Amino acid sequence: MIRTSFEDIRTASDSEPAQPLVRAIGGAVDALFATQHAAGYWWAELQSNVTITAEVVLLHHVWGTFARIPGSAAEHYFRAEQRDHGGWELAYGDGGELSVSVEAYMALRLLGVGRDDPALVRARAIILARGGISRARIFTNFHLALIGAYDWSGLPALPPSMMLLPDRGIFSIYDLSSWARGSTVPLIVVFDKKPVYGPPLDLGELYAEGSADVRYVLPTPRAPVEAFFNALDGLFKRAERAGIVPGRKRGLARAQRWILERQEATGDWGGIIPAMLNSMLALRALDYRIDDPEVVRGFAAIDTFTITERGAYRVQPCISPVWDTGLALRALIDAGVAPDDPRLIAAADWLIEKQILDYGDWVVKNPAGPPGGWAFEFDNRWYPDVDDTAVIAMALQLVDHPRPARVRAAVERAAQWVATMQSRGGGWGAFDIDNDKAWINRIAYSDLKASIDPPTADVTARVIEMFARCELPWEDGRFARALAYLLAEQEADGAWFGRWGVNYVYGTSGALAALSQTPGGAAIDAALVRGAVWLRSVQNADGGWGETTASYADPTLRGAGPSTPSQTAWALIGVLAVVERLPRLGSEFAAELERGIAFLVSTQRPDGTWHEAEFTGTGFPQHFFLRYHLYCQHFPLTALGRYAAFLRVRAE
């Protein structure tokens, strides 16, 4: 690590300008510090597609609270996000997506835009060309059902008796991922009530087959197991029509209690907009009033997720201050900022205060685990996650804190919790242990294929890296199982899949960063070399790296896409990790490293920042993507700082 380069930048004279690398590091450091909040944390926008804002517009229609949102600014946002092809995108540059476009169209209609408006005429053409409402996802049609634009009979059943199933049986709500659980429990209430709010909104123009010929049915099954679940759904619906719903009253009461228990004091549910919106819809279906405390807090929480600027109103799907702060802290220290800088101490103190010492939903399957994790958001005591926790622990151990015992205690608490979250196969998921019943994703309701939270290579790699960098002890053979899992996840070409970042560039970078720090011999070294060689093979002609979200649907597109600052940084971080462990490879990869660094230096803007329009974060592969506005700031800084350290070591 370099420790004095930032001071070198400060003292460089006009007649002896700092080298481009050092200037780039200094500019990036200044730019990142300029965005630090007074309390010590970093927090930038987390951007998704327009459905999140559309669903907030719908919620205000349901509650009759349109006065809470600036209607003209919301309309401006949807119009600005419409692309030349007439639709709205799931992620930047994807050519438009059916369900996203339907929800944006719905929102504009709710905002008072007429169907003959030129924007809607253009949108209608692409929606109909792609099959219309009948081909949209389950959750889009659920939102349409709330306003009478789709029939409830075409949606899956969610029997209230789900709430009564034993936690450790064949299936319970705790077999759903944390995000699916937080969104589904409130929908048990809504799907039971099947409400329609306000005069029905006629969207018949969006049915490709014509509104008179619509068949409200579940998607056609593509496998026997899906046909079985569709048949089971039919039985549930027939029983419901006959008034035979065992456990209905108790199940609804338990769902209501579960929802109320999990509302944070700040009004959030799970720290994510889908869970928050669905919980507010459940309260509406249960006839809560607009002035009930739970409703007041819920709307206040949603308001904190909104952004209104330059005449546009939009809503973030989540907020990421803990994650942003941990990654920014690591980047600044990698860049040579003194570890005892008061600004870094303030960030560390803020993070330590955010450590969660309460038991959350994770305890259902992990009763032995002591609390000690971190969540993604400001407040989310029910759902700490392994990935955030590992990043924060690594960030804290880099800081030269005046109270080192306080820092070490926080890191050790984190390690104890993370260790107990290891799944039986050796890997880690994000929020739960052994949350891997893949058949759940075959139910029609799970059309986003993201209802479970199985172990993944990227989260597992982060844990391995945390234990190595923080010099934490492993117990009971956990390391051997973790290492075996991560090595087995490497694909034939040397890459690793990236669950939470796009995609193989992200996964490979994380795996290399972890394996480079682990004890071991030939097997680890061979895996490292194969990973670095794969990264070299997908470097773009401009020196950078890029990968589009299309690689989730088509693995042959792995590592292919226009260069971006964040993905270039990930690739550099991965290759640098390999040559740090295997110095003999430094010369072999020197040209690739130089070209990658040159790309970052040349694309840095005068204010020290970088820009990328691409979505390089992943919510649900193929179905929901994210653009972290700080990814293209702190990851390039990390890469530049580590490259400077690499050059220093080579010079010595």
Image (cartoon, rainbow, N blue to C red):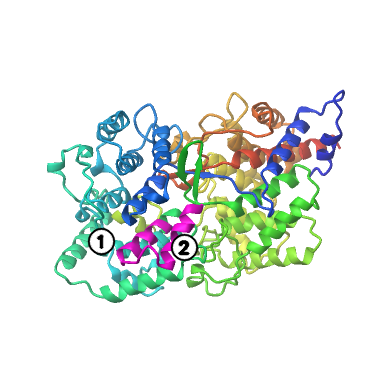
| Residue 113 x %, y % | 30, 37
Compared to 270, does 535 lie above or below?
A: above
Q: Residue at x 40, y 73 (%)?
A: 167
Q: What crowding class fits label 1: few (fewer than 14 Cα within 10 Å), some (14-19), or many (20 or more)?
A: many
Query: The residue tagged with tag 1: helix, strand or loop?
Result: loop
Residue toward you, 262 or 496: 262
* Image quadrant containing the N terminus: top right
Q: Residue at x 26, y 57 (%)?
A: 156
Question: Which residue is the site of mark 1?
Answer: 157
Which residues, given as a range, are shown in magenta?
276-304
Q: In which image quadrant can residue 291 be found?
A: bottom left
| Residue 45 x %, y % | 55, 44
Magenta residue check for 19? no
Question: Which residue is the site of mark 2?
Answer: 297
| Residue 378 x %, y % | 58, 58
Side (left or right) of 158 relative to 517: left
